[in-house]
Image (cartoon, helix red, strand yellow):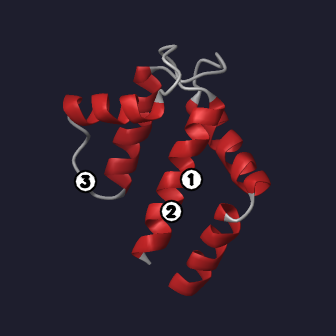
Amino acid sequence: MAAKLKKEIADYLGSEKKLFELSAEAFKIADEDNSGYLDKIEVREILTGLAADLGNDPPTSQQMDEAWNDLEVDGDGRITNKEFMNLIRNLLQSLYDSL
């Protein structure tokens, strides 16, 4: 099971097209107001949901601020699909490394 998952993750990490498609699909779901970008509230909901799925406590305000600053690289106060794709890539890489 883990070997199959690791191969699937490697396929995404090895293909910008596949990674973009996965990211775009997740971004569309996360962009609840269909604004074309994610705000802090939407990012908090994503990270809180991920923490719950993993059996962890929700992120603290400090952790949220750190995550936001890591994601929001162009300084416009919102997360674009491209910035979000970096999050997906990093999450997949972390998961791959843990398997």
| Mark 1 touches mark 2? (CB < 8 Å) | yes
Label 2 sits on a secondary structure element that is helix
Badge 2 density bin: few <14, some 14–19, many ≥20, Cα 10 Å = some
Quadrant placement of the C terminus = bottom left
Where does label 1 land, which residue? 89
At x 25%, y 53%, the residue is 56
Question: Measured along the vertical axis of the image, is residue 12 above or below residue 40?
Answer: below
Where does label 2 land, which residue? 93
Cα gap from disc 1 to disc 2, whole angstroms: 6 Å
Label 3 sits on a secondary structure element that is loop
Badge 3 density bin: few <14, some 14–19, many ≥20, Cα 10 Å = few
Label placed on residue 56? 3
Q: Nearer the viewer, mark 2 or mark 3?
A: 2
**Amino acid under disc 3:** Asn
The image quadrant of residue 86 is: top right
* Residue situated in front as seen by the camera: 54 or 75: 75
